[in-house]
Image (spheres, rainbow, N blue to C red):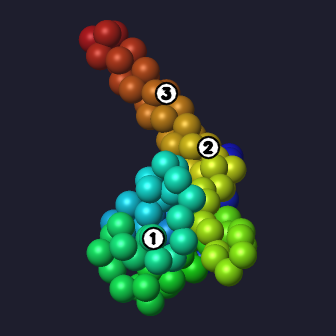
Amino acid sequence: MIYESSGINSRFDKVIGAFSSATRRNIILQLFEEDMTVNQIADKNKITKQAASKQKNILARSGIIKERKSGRELYCSINPQALIIIKDYVNQLESFWEKRLHKLKDLVEQQ
């Protein structure tokens, strides 16, 4: 099994938790397009800088984004490696349901 929960602090839980907010999901999509500062995140999402910083910190703790300093600015960028855990989990679910549907199909065809 690919996913085993080790409680609220598991890497998977942090990544999934980061996706629980529509604002964070928007930020993730925006960071796929370009690296941004907290000010840019705030402007693009029409939220305060404090709220943008809070969302950025949640994404950073989950590992979904990386931060790099350039001069006085702190830039956020997406860390696609962190999203592999979601892809693996979805693939595991897909495999489960394909097997179940195949068994159901076989049962229906037998009747």
Mark 3: secondary structure? helix
Mark 1 in CB contact with mark 2 (< 8 angstroms): no
Disc 1 target residue: 40
Mark 1: secondary structure? helix
Give percent across and percent down for residue 92.
57, 40
Give percent across and percent down for residue 65.
62, 64
Q: Nearer the viewer, mark 1 or mark 3?
A: 1
Q: Callout 2 environment at 10 Å: few (<14), some (14 to 19), or many (20+)?
A: some
Disc 3 target residue: 99
Tell which of 54 and 9 is nearer to you. Answer: 54
Tell which of 34 and 84 is nearer to you. Answer: 34
Q: Is residue 110 above or below residue 56?
A: above
Relative to residue 38, is residue 61 drawn left or right? right
Relative to residue 43, is residue 61 drawn left or right? right
Write down the quadrant of residue 5 in the picture.
Answer: bottom right
Q: Is residue 68 above or below residue 28?
A: below
Q: Amino acid at mark 1?
A: Gln
The residue positioned 40% from the left and 76% from the top of the image is 42
The answer to whether residue 21 is seen in the rendering is no
The residue positioned 51% from the left and 76% from the top of the image is 38
Q: CA distance from mark 3 to mark 2?
A: 17 Å
Sequence-first tag of 1 and 3: 1
Give percent across and percent down for residue 84.
64, 47
Disc 2 target residue: 88
Q: Amino acid at mark 2?
A: Asp
Relative to residue 9, is residue 27 drawn left or right? left
Sequence-first tag of 1 and 2: 1
The residue positioned 27% from the left and 11% from the top of the image is 111
Mark 2: secondary structure? helix
Q: Is residue 28 above or below residue 50?
A: above
Q: Callout 1 environment at 10 Å: few (<14), some (14 to 19), or many (20+)?
A: some
